[in-house]
Image: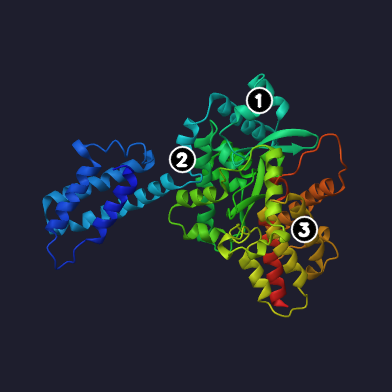
């Protein structure tokens, strides 16, 4: 088998489909199950092709399921056929996850080992240094600190083979820096621990939702009870990196340099709840946010964005593209389309949402294009536009005083949205040209979780009016 786990999955699925009815003779089916056992465990040991594929945490239950199939199949006792069916359920579940991860072109927890193996020693050192600097300072690593690590070599040469979905050049004031992403952090020396922390935190959020479907968030104290003090501090550092779209929670407040913090749980937790495997769910999120062709360096991203702008120029008749080929139709939504549709469906209310909806649609288009300046300015325009719907004159007043259905978690999120976007927008809108300029990145200006939360509360409020 060229692709062993994928083809073994096909065999297991076929065997499951061919399971005879209770009235039929199961002997030929049990003989096929015996052959399946031999493929999985030649010479009584797990097939060598499976050893690097099945995670250590799953190997025990996988082997027990295979052995149960072998024992039942070779007994030719029809009363034991249920053991075969139960074993196939476990095997298919494990193989489906691993095979899909192996075929997945994006990023997954299961691909970490292979990706780390492909890194050079210098690349590993730079990723570790960037992550460690973020842990210590919650900031991007200045390029001036990177140069001593690589000597006289060009950074572009050293980082060849990496991409902007792992590590990217950004601007911090007048300094150029390297910013590590969530996927990049998983490739560091701490990657295995960080992956486990992500899965554990998702399990925590899922458990809280199962206990109370209206849960709005959790605190660092709740995390400490599950994961311990050190892991809790590492987790908040990890969660303060840009998170994949549709991640079900985000850090909404931090104090004492991460000693105490809280996270807001969004409606996306429902998708987490619907997923039977937390790791598979996380893989989907990571893969959706991972772009192999994302440039590492600012200049290359600027050229790429200019190319996209040219493609989207109306004089180039972009609107005549087929629906499937339209570059914006296939882009993930920055503000959830379902959220906008809810507001559209309100009909006539005390407040007219026509301009709000247009601004949100324009924001989605600009985010899809990677137009960072437009994204932050439209964000501020939306924040200036909505306060009267909450009976306030300014968004600063709204953020400081309005509790809404989300109470403290909503208030914290709105305070963060107001303060951070105001600082970034002021710098980008009023900053004057200088001898050295670096363009902003989407990670600097993107606040989709907070905006979706704001629109969710706006919808609830207008619906009651």
What is the residue that sits farthest to the bottom in this orientation? 348
User: Helix, strand, or loop for circle 1?
Assistant: loop
**Looking at the image, is mark 1 or mark 3 earlier in the sequence?**
1
Q: Could you say which quadrant of the image residue 181 lies in? A: top right
**Looking at the image, is mark 2 or mark 1 earlier in the sequence?**
2
In front here: 411 or 22? 22
Residue found at x 36% / y 41%: 54
- Cα separation, mark 2 vs mark 1, equals 28 Å
Residue found at x 53% / y 56%: 208
Whether residues under marks 1 and 3 lie with C-beta atoms below 8 angstroms apart, the answer is no
Which label lies toward us, 1 or 3?
1
- Cα separation, mark 1 vs mark 3, equals 37 Å
Residue at mark 2 = 111
Give the numbered dot on residue 3: none
Q: Which colour scheme is used?
A: rainbow
Q: Could you say which quadrant of the image residue 399 lies in? A: bottom right
In front here: 435 or 405? 435
In the rendered view, does 48 fall on the left or right side of 409?
left
Whether residues under marks 2 and 1 lie with C-beta atoms below 8 angstroms apart, the answer is no
Q: Could you say which quadrant of the image residue 349 lies in? A: bottom right
Residue 175 location (% of width, % of height)? 77, 33
What is the residue that sits farthest to the top in this orientation? 151
Residue at mark 1 = 154
User: Helix, strand, or loop for circle 3?
Assistant: helix
Which label lies toward us, 2 or 1?
1
Give the numbered dot on residue 378: 3
If the image is split into quadrants, where does the C terminus sit? bottom right
Residue 65 location (% of width, % of height)? 26, 48
439 to 141, vertically: above or below: below
In front here: 105 or 454? 105
């Amino acid at each position: 088998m060229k692709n062993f786990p994928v083809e073994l999955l096909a065999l297991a699925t076929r065997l499951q489909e061919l399971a005879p009815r209770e009235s039929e003779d199961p002997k030929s089916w049990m003989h096929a199950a015996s052959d399946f056992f031999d493929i999985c465990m030649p010479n009584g040991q797990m097939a060598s092709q499976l050893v690097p594929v099945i995670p250590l945490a799953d190997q025990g239950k996988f082997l027990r399921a295979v052995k149960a199939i072998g024992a039942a199949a070779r007994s030719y006792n029809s009363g034991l056929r249920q053991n075969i069916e139960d074993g196939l359920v476990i095997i298919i579940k494990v193989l489906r996850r691993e095979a899909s991860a192996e075929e997945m072109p994006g990023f997954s927890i299961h691909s970490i080992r292979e990706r780390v193996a492909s890194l050079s020693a210098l690349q590993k050192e730079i990723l570790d240094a960037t992550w460690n600097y973020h842990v210590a300072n919650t900031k991007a690593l200045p390029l001036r600190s990177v140069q001593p690590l690589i000597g006289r070599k060009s950074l572009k040469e050293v980082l060849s083979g990496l991409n902007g979905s792992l590590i990217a050049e950004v601007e911090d004031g007048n300094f150029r820096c390297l910013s590590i992403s969530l996927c990049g952090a998983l490739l560091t020396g701490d990657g295995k621990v960080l992956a486990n922390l992500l899965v554990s935190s998702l399990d925590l959020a899922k458990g809280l939702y199962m206990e109370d479907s209206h849960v709005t968030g959790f605190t660092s104290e709740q995390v400490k009870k599950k994961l311990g003090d050190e892991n809790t501090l590492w987790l908040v550092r990890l969660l303060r990196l840009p998170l994949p779209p549709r991640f079900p929670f985000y850090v909404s407040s931090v104090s004492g340099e991460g000693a105490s913090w809280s996270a807001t749980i969004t409606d996306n937790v429902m998708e987490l709840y619907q997923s039977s495997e937390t790791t598979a769910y996380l893989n989907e999120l990571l893969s959706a946010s991972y772009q192999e062709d994302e440039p590492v360096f600012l200049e290359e991203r600027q050229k790429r964005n200019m190319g996209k702008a040219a493609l989207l120029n109306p004089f180039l008749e972009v609107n005549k593209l087929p629906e499937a080929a339209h570059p914006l139709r296939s882009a993930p939504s920055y503000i959830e389309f379902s959220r906008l549709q809810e507001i559209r469906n309100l009909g006539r209310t005390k407040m007219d949402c026509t301009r709000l909806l247009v601004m949100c649609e324009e924001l989605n288009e600009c985010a899809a294009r990677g137009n960072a300046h437009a994204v932050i300015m439209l964000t501020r325009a939306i924040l200036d536009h909505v306060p009267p719907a909450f009976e306030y004159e300014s968004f600063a007043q709204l953020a400081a005083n309005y509790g809404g259905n989300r109470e403290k978690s909503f208030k914290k999120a709105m305070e963060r949205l107001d303060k951070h976007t105001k600082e970034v927008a002021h710098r980008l809108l009023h900053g004057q040209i200088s001898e050295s300029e670096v363009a902003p990145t989407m990670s600097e200006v993107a606040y989709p979780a907070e905006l979706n939360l704001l629109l969710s509360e706006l919808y609830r409020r207008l619906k009651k009016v």
